[in-house]
Amino acid sequence: MTEQLSSASLLSDLRNLISQVHATVARSVNSAQVMLYWEVGRRIGQDILGSERAAYGEQIVSTVSKQLTAEFGRGFSKQNLARMIRFAEVFPNSEIVSTLSRQLGWSHFIEIIPLDTELKRGFYAEMCRVEQWSVRRLRDKIGGMLFERTALAKKPELVAAQELELLRQEDQLTPDLVFRDPYLLDFLGLADTYSERDLESAILRDLESFLIEFGSGFSFVARQKRITVDNDDYYLDLLFYHRRLRRLVAIELKLGKFQAQDKGQMELYLRWLEKYEQQPNEEAPIGLILCADKSEEHVELLQLENSGIRVATYLTELPPRELLQERLHQAKTRAQAKLEHQQDDSYN
C-alpha cells in the first residue's frame, strides 16, 4: 500500500513537472514566432518604403510569399505577410512587442492589428497581457466595445496615453481602466419586468459571467452586507474586492434613474467600510451605483468622483451595435465638453 502511494505521488510530481516544461516551451515558441513575424514585417516594410511605387510593393510581397511558402509552409501567405508588415507599422517599438509576446500569441495580434487607433490597440494589448485573455475572450471584448465603455476612452488622447503607459511600465491599473459604462448584462436573461432583488439574484446565479463582464481581479465578498449605524441597519446590495486596485468595491443596484439621494446612501456605506472593513495596506473603498438611467446632469453637479463614487448604466438587452456606438460617442462628447468647460473655468 505504501509503495502504491509513493508511486502515485511520484507520478503526480512527474506529470506536473512535464506539464510545466511543456507550458514554458509553448510560451517560448509563441514568443519567438511573434518576434519573427514582427522582424519579417519590419524588413519587408523597409524595402517597400524605399520605393514610391505601390505596384512594386505588391510585387515584392507576392514574390517573397511564393518563395517562403515553398520553403517554410503556409505561415507566409500574402495575407499573413501583409499582416506582418502592418504589425511592424502599428507596433514599431520592438521592446513593447517583446514584452507583449510573453503573454500574447500571433492569434491575439491578428485581432488587435486591424483596430483603428493606436490608443485602442495599446489598450487591448495591455489589458490582454495583464488579464491573460484567451483569443476568444479578446475577440469578445473587442466585439463588446470594451475600450469605448471605459472612462479612458472619454479622456483627451494625451492623458489617456499617459495612463496606458503607466500600465505598460508599472502594471498600475487605475479605476478608469477597470470600470465601464454601460455594463452589458444581457447574459442574465431577465424578463421585461423584474425587481432589484431579481437583478441581484440573477447576478449571483451567473457570477462567473458577471465577473467576466466586470473584468479580472474582482472577488465576491458579500450579498446584502449589513451595515449598522446608530442602531439603524442598512444593507449593501453587493460587496466585492479588487485585487489589483487593493480596495473594496461596493455596488448598489437601482432599477430606475440615478437619484441625488443615492449619493448620500453610498457615501455612508463607503465611510462605514473605510472605518470597519478597510485593511491597513488597502486603498479607500470605491462605490459603483448601477442604474437603468445615469441622469447625466445629476452626476455632473454632484461631483461624485470626489467622493469615490461612480455611476454607470446597465443593459439587460444588448442593443444593435450601431445604437451602442452612437450612445458611446455621445457619452464621449459630453465628457470631453465637460473637461473643456472645467479647463476654461480654471483659466478664468
Image (cartoon, helix red, strand yellow):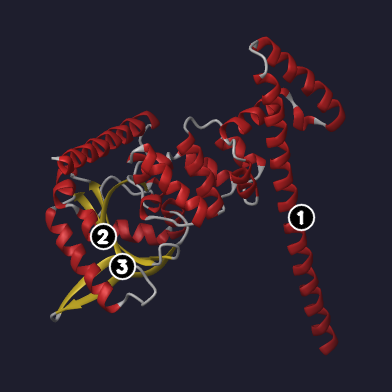
Residue 339 in picture, x, y percent from top left = 24, 40
Q: Is residue 176 visible?
A: yes
Q: Name the residue under label 2.
A: 308
What residue is shown at x 18% (from left), y 68% (from top)?
Answer: 268
Query: Residue 198, located in which quarter of the rendered image?
Result: bottom left
Q: Three-letter amino acid code at disc 3?
A: Ala
Q: What element carries label 1?
A: helix
Q: Which amino acid does label 2 sit on?
A: Gly
Farthest residue to the front: give it: 347
- Which comes before the other along the chain, label 3 or label 2? 3
Foreground residue, 271 or 321?
A: 271
Q: How far apart are marks 3 and 1 (CA)?
A: 41 Å
| Residue 293 found in image quarter | top left
151 lies left or right of 166: left
**Secondary structure found at label 3:** loop
**Pointer 3 residue:** 284
Q: Which amino acid does label 1 sit on?
A: Val
Vertical placement of residue 323 versus 204, above or below: above
- The answer to whether mark 3 and mark 2 are in CB contact below 8 A is yes
Q: Residue 122 carries which label?
A: none
Q: Is residue 15 above or below residue 48?
A: below
> What residue is shown at x 19% (from left), y 78% (from top)?
228
- Disc 2 is placed on an element classified as loop
Residue identified by numbered label 1: 25
Alpha-carbon span between mark 3 and mark 2: 8 Å
Q: Where is residue 61 in the image (x, y as percent from the top left)?
A: 73, 20
Please state the horizontal and vertical placement of residue 318, each as a whole percent of the image: 37, 39
- Specify the quadrant that holds the N terminus: bottom right
Pinpoint residue 26: horizontal percent, then vertical percent: 74, 52
